[in-house]
Image (cartoon, rainbow, N blue to C red):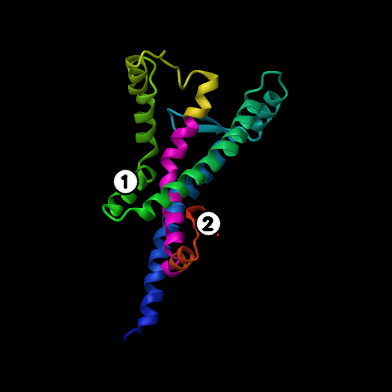
Amino acid sequence: MKLTLRQRQVVWAYIFMSVSLLFFIVIRWYPTILAFNISFRDWNVFAGSGEWTGLENYRDLWEDALKPRSAVRAAFWNTIRYVAFGVPLQMVAALGVALLLMQIRRLSGFFRAAYFVPFVTSFVAVAFVWNWLFAPQVGLINQILSALGLPMQMFLRDPDLALPSITFVAVWRSIGFAIIIFLAGLQQIPDMYYEAARIDGANAWQLFWR
């Protein structure tokens, strides 16, 4: 049986969708379900197993939240601060880079791939690299600060610097995906609209905003 062009397109669409679905099942859903199961156990990381404790871990979290110096409350507010600053920063930076890439004609594919590489890089590899960059004595960033005559910083140990440092790394790693999304949307706008706006005397800000 010979498939029509429309039928072949539908088949290929389902194939590509199944790949994405498999990715989310393996990378997203399975770890989430596993973590939920671990939350009910006295888990031993080295043994890879743990005894069932029911709601004991959640009870410990609740008791900790009632303490004056609560690690649970600190983690909660750190998450709020990360979302409040990290997500808008990522969106604004991604949109800015996407607009710049729209203006680049030569080597545009190279720059797009370069920005996307961190997103597909392993979390473990990213953590190792940035842990070395932020290292107090031998880290590259502190070496540069020392060469400039500036004091070295404890990026991951200073309470005032730890969250901004982690937020920066998280934005750096995930910005590539947002850039691709913004870029795909910008490329869907026909050039005729930009040309008509320029003829009407629109400046760069008006071209972007309207």
- Residue 92 against residue 62 in the figure, above or below: below
Helix, strand or loop at mark 1: helix
Q: In the image, residue 59 lies at what x, y percent?
A: 68, 30
The residue to which callout 1 is attached is: 114
Q: In the image, residue 43 lies at what x, y percent?
A: 52, 30
Q: In the image, residue 144 lies at what x, y percent?
A: 33, 20
- Please name the residue shown 36% across and 23% down the image: 141
Q: In the image, residue 123 lies at what x, y percent?
A: 40, 38
Q: Quadrant of the N terminus?
A: bottom left
Q: Amino acid at mark 1?
A: Ala
Q: Nearer the viewer, residue 157 or 71?
A: 157
Check residue 44 for magenta coloring: no
Over which residues does the magenta segment extend?
Answer: 166-192
Check residue 191 for magenta coloring: yes
The residue to which callout 2 is attached is: 206
Q: Amino acid at mark 2?
A: Gln
- Please name the residue shown 41% across and 54% down the image: 180
Helix, strand or loop at mark 2: helix
Q: CA distance from mark 1 to mark 2?
A: 29 Å
| SS majority, magenta | helix
Q: Nearer the viewer, residue 203 or 26?
A: 203
- Please name the residue shown 36% across and 54% down the image: 103
Which residue extends farthest bottom? Answer: 1
